[in-house]
Image: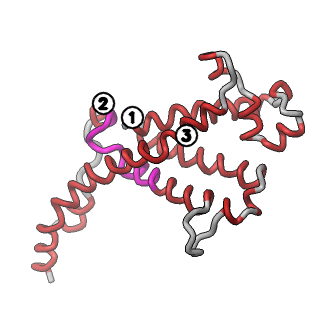
Amino acid sequence: MSALSRMHYRMIAPLARLGDDLIIPTLARFLFAAVLFMWFWNSAVTKLGGGGFGALFTPSFNAFAQIFPKGAEAAGYDIGQATVFQKVVILAGTWGEFILPILIIIGLLTRVAAIGTIIFLVVLSLPALFGHGAVSDPAVLGGWFDGNPGGVILDQRALWIFLLAVLAVRGAGPLSLDRLIFGRMGSGSRMEDEYAV
């Protein structure tokens, strides 16, 4: 059995090292850029008010309505009626939608950015579920094991979170600012540890 294990290691270890270090994190960042970056960017743009650069520091009624739909409706969609807490959440959400995806794509503070984006997606899903009524709409909510992968919340966002979890665990890989600035972190691949003889 030991000889079979060593033979397996000799065949698989180079591919596993390449996958651990280069393929998995680089592919995860590429897929994030190709599939999700513009979704985050476009969503962030809808939250900006007018006024150029100053819009980043001024909560908009669009963001108020998206993030706090019931509160915005109660306030007549007047951003001036938003509480300090609501304004802080709106600005943090808007900045997060711009900054976190850029950090992931360039591979800077990738693990932190991926965890932040996961938290952001969970928080973002709450108004969709409870403020906009998606919890009672099976087409939006979706369902696992139902044979239809088109549900926005349980299906699509679960895959997004998995992709981000890969980056949170593996990091950005060698083609990143993290590697350039911080160097190689960790002692080696898991395959080496698992098959060490």
* Mark nearer the N terminus (1 vs 2): 1
Circle nearer the viewer, 1 or 2:
1
Question: Which amino acid lies under the numbered mark 3 shown in the image of this protein?
Answer: Phe
* Mark nearer the N terminus (1 vs 3): 3
Image disc number at residue 40: 3
| Disc 1 to disc 3: CB gap under 8 Å | no
Q: How is the image coloured?
A: secondary structure
Q: Which residues are magenta?
A: 163-178
Q: Which residue is mark 2?
A: 181
- Residue sitting at the far bottom: 1
When the figure is inspected, residue 101 is found, relative to residue 59, above or below; the finding is below
| Disc 1 to disc 2: CB gap under 8 Å | yes
Q: Quadrant of the C terminus?
A: bottom left
Q: Looking at the picture, how far across and down is residue 142, in whole percent?
A: 64, 65
Q: Is residue 96 left or right of residue 12?
A: right
When the figure is inspected, residue 140 is found, relative to residue 21, above or below; the finding is below
Question: Which amino acid lies under the numbered mark 2 shown in the image of this protein?
Answer: Ile
State the image quarter where residue 75 is shown. Answer: top right
Judge whether residue 166 is colored magenta: yes
When the figure is inspected, residue 37 is found, relative to residue 16, above or below; the finding is above
Check disc 3: other Cα within 10 Å, few if <14, some if 14-19, many if 20+: some
Q: Looking at the picture, how far across and down is residue 111, in whole percent?
A: 43, 43
Total marks in image = 3
Image disc number at residue 108: 1
Task: Report the Cα–Cα distance between label 1 and label 3.
Answer: 17 Å
Q: Is residue 113 left or right of residue 88?
A: left
Q: Is residue 150 left or right of residue 105?
A: right
Q: Nearer the viewer, residue 165 or 78?
A: 78
SS of the residue under disc 2 = helix
